[in-house]
């Protein structure tokens, strides 16, 4: 022990950006020929990532000049409250939508006994019926935990069912949300927006102690494919519409602010989710400033739900990892309520096991990871701060664009749907080329899928609004198509394993994405390889450039003569080093190709019915 502080980094010089750039160039130019080296500008272009929204993600971030501000104070970027070191966690608000009243009641009580701190009920024809709410909540004490509702079909009926359930209890002790959201109903159903119930239910909610009437639900847009910037922009634009409507009814902005809750998504893009939640608070605080809400009351209350769009049907247990990342991101981003959907959501209604896993993910994040003890864990991360600002700036520009006609008109005119369609088109390209990979589906798929025990969902009512999509659907459709037959693509592996191994593994995994089996041969003469491929329609050559130069054309020719109709090469035709390559070889398999188009075409050539 000494009085001199230990300086662990004192013997090391502080690296400069120039030092970092020099190391970058060393790596990227390592195998480039003399005179063809990349400049640092070219290198940075290769290292940058551009999102669906056109946001630029830099490979390196340095200290920002802007003052970070503090948690719990305007503009609330760093959180709406100050944490003191004790665990001050969010509401673990689990969803219940199973129409089996006995099962739902059992799960409600389990949730409250085993870590959940709030409940959320979906009240719809394919979920919990309004008349079944008392039975579903039998034994639940409403004064002990918040309770909120939502509906895809009738938000007024859902709110009425909640109010009726609370009847006879002390209004001052009730906590929750009535879930009134006219624009979400319009987006889901494709009907004109009706804000008529808003004013009535705000007055009803004001008669309770801790109840909000309105929800700005962004999930219909996220489910339909909205980008991060679009979700932010639509949330703020919708909130502004609701403020205007309430102001016209004589309800002060400060009161209106106290009656609005945002319901937003969290997905497996950890940093984007964190930044989006932080940016929403800053934007909503700006709206509060403009309309005259006192500075301490401008914070946005956010109920975060794990995005259905990120869930996969295939390899469903990977969804456990996705909801863990999403829950962590929501917590770090400062959410006040979090709902984690079970990993088997796509397959059907969750079981006791999948509900327990979804609930425990949140408990692990809050209790074992101690996120609830830390104020704004991401604050000061130069990347997160820069991303938060970039998201906020672009979303504010979208709000200003929507404000030229208003969110109600933008939704009714189809402008919102068109914008989401553009985002879906850009995302579809990235998914197809696997620059936006889906683990277990578009990358590293299982050849066989495990049986998943689920409770079947009842038929959902047809809605005429925005259509929900999931990112993995296009790949799942390919697997479904393959299941109608037994498609095979023959892999002609040339040379020794050290020659063909890497490309064989790549091609096998790629074809497995579409459920296509890959019988193969190893080495041999062109005639021997062609004999092993007998009866197959499609083959892919796999090897190194050196071996291709000697064997690609002879083997491809032998395969064609043996009746193989289509022959591809894993890599580039140029590696065959022959003028015949473009005529003998029908295509290439390579990283960055349109996998969806290739697999669909392969199934066509194999005669698999659509």
Image (tube, helix red, strand yellow):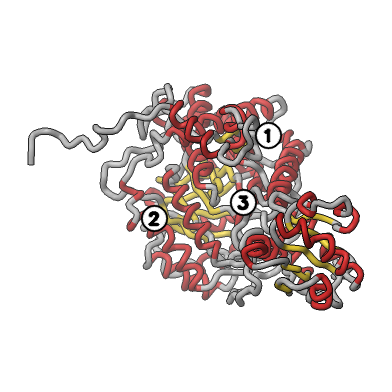
Displayed quadrant of residue 344: bottom right
- Identify which residue is drawn at 75% across, 56% down: 589
Q: Nearer the viewer, mark 2 or mark 3?
A: 2
| Vertical arrangement, residue 23 with respect to residue 594, above or below | above
Q: In the image, is 60 to the left or to the right of 194?
A: left
Residue denoted by label 2: 365
Percent of width and height locating residue 420: 71, 42
Q: Are marks 3 and 1 in contact (CB under 8 Å)?
A: no
Q: Which of the two residues, 311 or 40, is positioned nearer the viewer here? A: 40
- Identify which residue is drawn at 34% across, 40% down: 375
Q: CA distance from mark 2 to mark 3?
A: 35 Å
Q: Earlier in the sequence, mark 2 or mark 1?
A: 2
Residue denoted by label 3: 156
Residue 407 is marked as 1
Q: Earlier in the sequence, mark 2 or mark 3?
A: 3
Q: Nearer the viewer, mark 3 or mark 1?
A: 1
Residue 255 is marked as none
Residue 39 at least partly seen = yes
Percent of width and height locating residue 500: 67, 63
Q: Which of the two residues, 334 or 576, is positioned nearer the viewer here? A: 576
Q: Earlier in the sequence, mark 3 or mark 1?
A: 3
Residue 248 at least partly seen = no
């Amino acid at each position: 022990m000494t009085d001199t502080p230990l300086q662990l980094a004192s013997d090391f010089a502080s690296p400069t950006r120039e030092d970092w750039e020099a190391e970058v160039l060393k790596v990227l130019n390592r195998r480039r020929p003399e005179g063809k080296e990349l400049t640092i500008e070219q290198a940075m272009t290769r290292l940058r990532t551009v999102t669906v929204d056109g946001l630029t993600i830099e490979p390196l971030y340095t200290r920002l000049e802007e003052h970070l501000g503090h948690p719990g104070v305007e503009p609330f970027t760093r959180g709406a409250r100050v944490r003191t070191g004790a665990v001050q966690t969010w509401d673990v608000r689990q969803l219940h939508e199973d129409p089996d009243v006995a099962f739902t009641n059992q799960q409600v009580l389990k949730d409250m006994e085993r870590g959940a701190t709030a409940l959320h009920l979906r009240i719809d024809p394919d979920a919990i019926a309004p008349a079944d709410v008392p039975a579903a909540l039998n034994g639940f004490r409403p004064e002990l935990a918040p309770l909120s509702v939502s509906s895809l079909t009738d938000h007024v009926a859902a709110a009425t069912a909640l109010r009726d359930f609370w009847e006879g209890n002390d209004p001052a002790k009730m906590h929750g949300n009535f879930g009134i959201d006219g624009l979400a109903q319009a987006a889901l159903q494709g009907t004109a927006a009706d804000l008529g119930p808003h004013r009535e239910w705000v007055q009803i909610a004001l008669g309770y102690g801790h109840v909000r009437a309105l929800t700005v639900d962004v999930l219909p847009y996220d489910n339909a494919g909205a980008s991060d910037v679009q979700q932010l922009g639509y949330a703020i634009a919708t909130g502004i519409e609701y403020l205007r409507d309430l102001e016209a009814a004589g309800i002060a902005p400060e009161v209106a602010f106290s009656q609005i809750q945002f319901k937003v998504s969290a997905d497996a893009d950890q940093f984007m989710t964190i930044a989006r939640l932080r940016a929403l608070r800053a934007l909503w605080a700006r709206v509060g400033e403009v309309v005259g809400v006192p500075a301490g009351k401008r914070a946005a209350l956010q109920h975060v739900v794990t995005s259905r769009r990120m869930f996969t049907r295939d390899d469903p247990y990977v969804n456990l990892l996705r909801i863990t990342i999403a829950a962590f991101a929501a917590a770090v981003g400062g959410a006040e309520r979090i709902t984690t959907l079970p990993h088997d959501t796509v397959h059907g209604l969750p079981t006791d096991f999948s509900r327990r896993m979804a609930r425990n993910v949140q408990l692990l994040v809050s209790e074992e990871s101690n996120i609830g003890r830390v104020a704004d864990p991401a604050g000061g991360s130069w990347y997160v701060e820069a991303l938060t600002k970039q998201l906020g700036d672009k979303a504010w520009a979208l709000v200003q664009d929507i404000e030229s006609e208003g969110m109600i008109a933008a939704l009714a005119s189809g402008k919102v749907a068109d914008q989401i369609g553009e985002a879906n088109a850009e995302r579809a390209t990235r998914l197809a080329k696997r620059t936006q990979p889906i683990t277990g589906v578009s990358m590293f798929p299982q050849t066989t899928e495990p049986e998943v025990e689920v409770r079947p969902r009842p038929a959902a009512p047809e809605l005429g609004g925005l259509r929900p999509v999931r990112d993995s659907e296009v790949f799942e459709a390919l697997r479904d198509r393959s299941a109608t037959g037994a498609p095979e693509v023959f892999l002609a592996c040339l040379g020794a394993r050290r020659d063909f191994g890497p490309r064989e593994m790549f091609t096998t995994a790629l074809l497995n994405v579409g459920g296509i089996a890959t019988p193969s041969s190893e080495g041999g003469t062109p005639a021997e390889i062609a004999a092993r491929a007998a009866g197959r329609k499609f083959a892919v050559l796999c090897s190194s450039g050196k071996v291709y130069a000697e064997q690609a054309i002879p083997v491809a020719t032998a395969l064609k003569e043996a009746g193989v109709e289509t022959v591809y090469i894993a890599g580039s035709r140029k590696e065959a080093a022959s003028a015949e390559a473009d005529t003998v070889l029908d295509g290439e398999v390579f990283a960055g190709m349109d996998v969806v188009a290739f697999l669909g075409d392969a199934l066509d050539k194999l005669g698999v019915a659509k």
